[in-house]
Image (cartoon, rainbow, N blue to C red):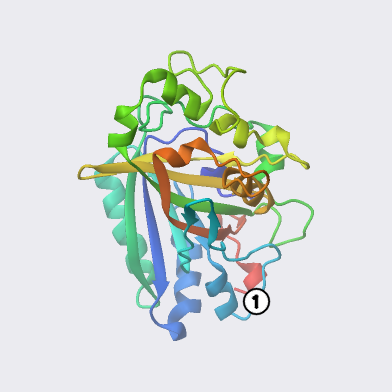
Amino acid sequence: MQTTQSGILAEETKLARYLAFTIDSEADVVSALSTLAAQVDLSNTVVGLGESLVKLLGKDIPGLVTLPAQSGRGIDIPSTPTALWCWLRGTDRGELFHRSRQIELMLMPAFALGDVTDSFQYDENRDLSGYIDGTENPSGDEAIDAAIVQGQGNGLDGGSFVAVQQWLHDFDILDAMQTNERDDVIGRHIKDNEEFDEAPDSAHVKRAAQESFEPEAFMLRRSMPWAEGMEGGLVFVAFGKSFVAFDAVLKRMLGNEDTISDALFKFTRPISGAYFWCPPVKGNKLDLSALDL
């Protein structure tokens, strides 16, 4: 879709970098956003705005909220909102580094760069647990229906909402599991990626089966592994036409429907989480007309 940031619907990313910005100078925000909208390379960069930034501008984007902190049985899901998020896609880590600096300079002095997370493709599309990630992702028109805002009017149509979480894996726990135990956690056999009916009800594919919700909770996942030093995990990135699907899946994973927690929590937990609105595109530039920019 020509009105959608192209990275949202792109099917493959070799390397990525995620930048999170906080507001440093309110007086310079409008100028910085205007510069970013005009100059950012949208062929390989996706931009998201947080609720706090939209509110600072005195505007409201229907459907944009702040990710709430949530809890399940012994599980805490953090909320770490920030003003602005950029997802840089590429094939060269040096190029990603220099593009990061360019974006940082575009946004100064209005925004200060906070968290920077690098991620990568592992054996095509595997999580660091070894299991293929995103098997049930919609594609084609179904991806557009799941991830892209339509029928809301100019300045909104072509946009998207994105949930972003950084998950930290405990590899000592994972390594101590036998293969059949790991398969039961995921609900797929690692050897062939096939689901199996005899998996326990806590298996991730059973907890998060998007077609099992009413309405169906399809979203477009663009998650990638991360590693720093000897720690690692998954940067979970899910685009939707709203946050309804993500919220429904997360609640079920926490066991808030039936007290059955997702078995994923045996070896991994999110350490951050935020919601963003990804504006549409007009003339190959960010369309911020919904913010009167």
Closer-to-camera residue (44/166): 166
Picture coordinates of residue 232, whole percent (x, y): 30, 42
- Of residues 74 and 216, which is closer to you in this image? 74
Q: Image quadrant of residue 93?
A: top left
Q: Quadrant of residue 23?
A: bottom left
Above or below residue 136? Residue 161 is below
Query: Please, what secondary structure does the residue beneath circle 1 have?
Result: loop
| Residue furthest to the left | 229
The residue furthest bottom is 27
Who's the residue at 40% across and 62% down the image?
20
Q: With 59 as the anchor, is 72 left or right in this view?
A: left
In depth, the one of 200 and 269 nearer the eye is 200
* Above or below 53: residue 5: above
Q: Is residue 132 above or below residue 248?
A: above
Left or right of 257, for residue 239: left
**Residue picked out by circle 1:** 59
Q: How many marks?
A: 1
Q: Quadrant of the N terminus?
A: top right
Residue 220: x and y, percent? 59, 40
Residue at 64 percent across and 50 percent down: it is 256
**Position of 251 compared to 133: left or right?**
right
What residue do we see at 59% from left, 73% from top?
293
Residue 24: percent from left, percent from top: 38, 79
Q: Where is residue 146 shown, x and y percent of the image? A: 68, 42
Q: Quadrant of residue 139?
A: top right
Q: Residues within 10 Å of mark 1 (few under 14, many from 20)?
A: few
Q: Residue furthest top?
A: 192
| Amino acid at pointer 1 | Lys
